[in-house]
């Protein structure tokens, strides 16, 4: 996916989060509370998403999940085993990105990479991921929006599932 420098996306308001949750529930049916890490794409464009986390054997990055506009996808099923998760996403149609200050490895095609150091030397690319402190919650949801960030900070937001 091509990256367009300088284009960043913003935080979702509480009202838009509630609206997206209602739309997702209506579109996909109500499901019982389930522990997982989900990403919801509140844009109209296809988005590619990568996630990073600390596993027992060390750091891991995985991707790409392709999430259509106005849909959600579960990246990690079951109760979360780490407190911190890291997310990077790219708009496949407009070239923007949701990123952050934590460098991790990604690949052009589908990937699962052990370790976050020496990305280039190992044949990978490096991308800036946004950190999420889940507070050791069993579930977490991140919503990607195309509204500019008000505070100039990272362009994604997370919340616990209701």
Image (spheres, rainbow, N blue to C red):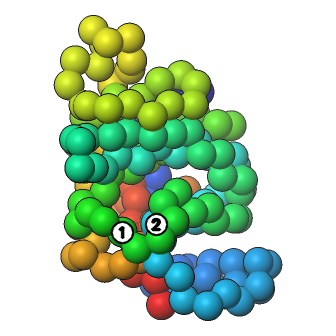
Whether residue 63 is visible to the viewer of this picture, yes or no, is yes
Q: Of the residues under marks 2 and 1, which one precedes in the sequence?
A: 2
Q: Quadrant of the N terminus?
A: top right
In this rendering, the label closer to the viewer, 2 or 1: 1
Q: Position of residue 47 (x, y in %)?
A: 62, 46
Q: Residue at left 22%, top 18%?
A: 118
Instruction: In this rendered view, identify the residue nearer to me: 80 or 93.
Output: 80
Residue at which label 1 appears: 80
Q: Tell me whether circle 2 and circle 1 mark residues in contact (CB < 8 Å).
A: yes
Number of on-image labels: 2
Q: Residue at left 31%, top 57%?
A: 85
User: Does 120 sit above or below residue 92?
Assistant: above
Categorize mark 1 by other alpha carbons within 10 Å: few (<14), some (14-19), many (20+). some
Residue 46, label in figure: none
Whether residue 128 is visible to the viewer of this picture, yes or no, is no
Report the Cα–Cα distance between label 2 and label 1: 7 Å
- Farthest-out residue, front: 57
User: Does 127 sit above or below residue 79?
Assistant: above
User: Does 149 sit above or below residue 49?
Assistant: below
Q: Is 161 left, or right, of 134 in this rendering? A: right
Label 2 element class: strand
Q: Position of residue 90 (x, y in %)?
A: 53, 40
Q: Position of residue 113 (x, y in %)?
A: 38, 31
Q: Residue at left 36%, top 69%?
A: 80
Q: Residue at left 48%, top 90%?
A: 162
User: Does 161 sit above or below residue 36?
Assistant: below
- Residue 125: image quadrant is top left
Categorize mark 2 by other alpha carbons within 10 Å: few (<14), some (14-19), many (20+). many
Label 1 element class: loop
Q: Position of residue 39 (x, y in %)?
A: 53, 62
Residue at which label 2 appears: 37
Q: Is 145 left, or right, of 68 in this rendering? A: left
């Amino acid at each position: 996916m091509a990256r367009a420098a300088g284009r960043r996306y913003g935080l979702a308001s509480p009202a838009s989060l509630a609206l997206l949750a209602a739309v997702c529930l209506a579109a996909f049916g109500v499901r019982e509370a389930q522990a997982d890490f989900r990403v919801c794409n509140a844009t109209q464009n296809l988005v590619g998403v990568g996630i990073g986390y600390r596993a027992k054997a060390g750091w891991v990055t995985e991707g790409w999940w392709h999430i259509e506009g106005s849909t959600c996808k579960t990246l990690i099923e079951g109760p979360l085993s780490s407190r911190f998760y890291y997310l990077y996403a790219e708009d496949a149609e407009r070239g923007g990105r949701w990123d952050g200050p934590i460098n991790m490895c990604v690949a052009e095609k589908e990937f699962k990479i052990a370790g976050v150091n020496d990305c280039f030397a190992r044949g990978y690319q490096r991308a800036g991921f946004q950190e999420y402190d889940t507070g050791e919650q069993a579930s977490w949801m991140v919503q990607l929006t195309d509204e500019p960030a008000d505070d100039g900070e990272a362009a994604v937001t997370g919340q616990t599932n209701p």
